[in-house]
Image (tube, rainbow, N blue to C red):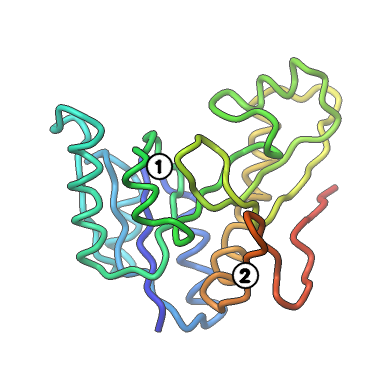
Amino acid sequence: MKRLVILISGRGSNMEAIVKACAAQGWSAEVAAVISNRPDAGGLQFAAQHGIATAVVDHKAYSSREAFDAELARVIDGYAPDLVVLAGFMRILTPGFTAHYARRMLNIHPSLLPAFTGLHTHERALEMGCKIAGVTVHFVTAELDHGAIVMQAAVPVRAGDDAKSLSARVLAAEHQIYPQSVRWFLEDALVWDGDRVHHRDGMAQSLFLA
């Protein structure tokens, strides 16, 4: 049985979606732990209520990113995960950390990468007059919001949208494609072709929502 460790910084809605999908779809996997860098992260309570181990590595207690990442890696590795999942984990990770989990750490970003890396993605999409927005699941590398794309979902930008309404539409898409991407990894369905990833059976890695 494969093991997941999920990292969160807040309410962890994508973590919830993954936990629920794992149970409902009968994955041959378990969420071994949910770890946060914030003691007040709301998702910790959800995890505990579902019998999942929790841990906090408070970044404020460390004098450098390297020191924090070293302790975080130590705690993660204590759960022996096959995959580390970033689910709203709001920390920039050091190259040493990303190298340690190379090709076994996923992230989700609320844009159609490579567009709009970093923060304020919805505001920037609206400012640019984009007609579609979306979300990307990708493997984590040392470069922020880069790495091989596993799956993307596109949603329309509607007349009258603001950042809040667009964010809600994108979040619904996140909750669809992140569990799917995690499941593909756990099923060994993702095949590397150089720096790119495709599904071994040719399943669509894109989703278009009305």
Say what secondary structure mark 2 lies in: strand
Residue 94 in view (yes/no) = yes
Q: Which residue is mark 2?
A: 190
Q: Which residue is at 36% across, 51% downward?
A: 7
Quarter-of-image position of residue 118: top right
Q: Name the quarter where the N terminus is drawn.
A: bottom left
Q: Is residue 66 above or below residue 174?
A: above
Residue 176 in view (yes/no) = no
Looking at the rendered structure, the kind of residue marked 1 is: Phe
Q: Nearer the viewer, residue 167 or 192?
A: 192
Q: Is residue 193 above or below residue 129?
A: below
Looking at the rendered structure, the kind of residue marked 2 is: Leu
Q: Position of residue 90 (x, y in %)?
A: 40, 35
Report the label total.
Answer: 2
Q: Position of residue 26 (x, y in %)?
A: 52, 83
Q: In the rendered view, does 130 fall on the left or right side of 103?
A: right
Quarter-of-image position of residue 117: top right
